[in-house]
Image (spheres, rainbow, N blue to C red):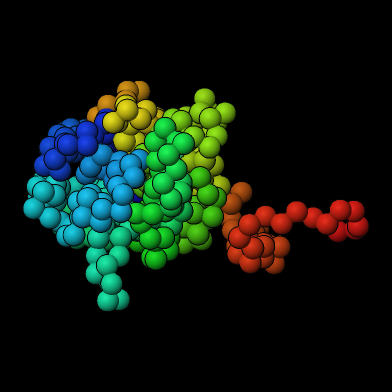
Amino acid sequence: MSRQMIIGAAQLGPIAREEPRSAVVKRMIALMREAKAMNCDLVAYPELCLTTFFPRWWFDDDQDAIDAWFERAMPSNETAPLFETARELGLFFTFGFAELTEEEGRTRRFNTSIIVNPKGETVLKYRKVHLPGHAEHEPWRTFQHLEKRYFEVGNLGFNVARAGDVNMGMCICNDRRWPETYRVMGLQDVELVLLGYNTPIHNPPAPQHDALSNFHNQLVMQSGAYQNGTFVVGVAKCGVEEGVMQIGQSQIIAPSGETIAMAHTLEDELIVARCDFDLCASYKRTIFNFDAHRRTEAYGLIVERTGAIPPATGGAN
Ligand code: ING
């Protein structure tokens, strides 16, 4: 009997700045019920999906105004209906939120995601490692991208948990652009990578990339899937959100690297695919049999060196 799950990617359209969490949770529950009607076993939601993408604004270091975007408890009063509905429907689900917590005697703030099983237990938590953008106010930008200011670098690493008879892992948004993200999970035999994203189509430092936003989105997730023999589920928060156009193209990708389901709107939209996790072996045991083919003695720079150092001119290697 092959190990299969029907996976739902629940893309969210724009969330207005004033939209309360309770209204967003209602939208999420509507998608969850649609997923159940499509016989889904798991529903995946985007990054920071309970509110509008607040790192697009500078808040003059008004910490209370910033912290209003964070969750101090999970589940909370506003999110409890989501957990209750998932238990009622017998679904796994995963979503991203801004986490504010007291750890090691101080207040910590992370861009976080969790996977919750049908019993309502959190089986995996992840805190975003690759924080894009900048830490200081840069008024020249049409919008800010202040994740480096509002969040700490995630301190949990890239872990993989066995749940529902599948090796599941997570990452968040910018993480999906870095091959190391997938490979660390690949080295834990990941079979399903769940990730959400908020990706503006315009990147102020590199407008020449804007027209390639959807291509780059698909390229990195398809590569990560194929090179590690894993399914990848990428879920967008998209559309024009507080004046910023964010890409959609939520998609479910097989270990072959093929996209097997993709959203075609910039609104709340559920896409669904049947995922047979035994297909992962076809890649993990052949072309990407890490144990047989990887040469770690040649890879030292990947961990030893952070930034690129160009070669000295001339001379033998
Ligand atoms: N978003 C972006 C991402 O990597 C980004 C970062 C910002 C890309 C602006 C392009 C333009 O998809 C997040 N939230 O990481």
- Say which of 304 and 308 sits in front: 308
* Residue ID at (34%, 45%): 58
Position of residue 312 measured from the top left corner of the image (x, y, whole percent): 83, 57
Q: Is residue 144 above or below residue 287?
A: above
User: Is residue 140 found left or right of 99 in the rendered image?
Assistant: right
**Residue 23 appears in the picture as rendered:** yes
Position of residue 87 measured from the top left corner of the image (x, y, whole percent): 12, 51
Question: What is the residue that sits farthest to the right in this orientation?
Answer: 315
**Residue 277 appears in the picture as rendered:** no
- Say which of 276 and 199 sits in front: 199
- Say which of 168 and 96 sits in front: 96
On the image, which quarter does residue 128 sit in? Answer: bottom left
On the image, which quarter does residue 196 sit in? Answer: top left
* Residue ID at (41%, 60%): 153
* Residue ID at (39%, 30%): 247
Tally the numbered discs.
0
Position of residue 37 measured from the top left corner of the image (x, y, whole percent): 16, 33
* Residue ID at (11%, 42%): 22
**Quadrant location of the C terminus in the rendered image:** bottom right
- Say which of 265 and 191 sits in front: 265
Position of residue 180 measured from the top left corner of the image (x, y, whole percent): 54, 55
Q: Is residue 90 above or below residue 217?
A: below
Q: Is residue 132 above or below residue 12?
A: below
Question: What is the residue that sits farthest to the bottom in this orientation?
Answer: 105
Q: Is residue 315 above or below residue 194?
A: below
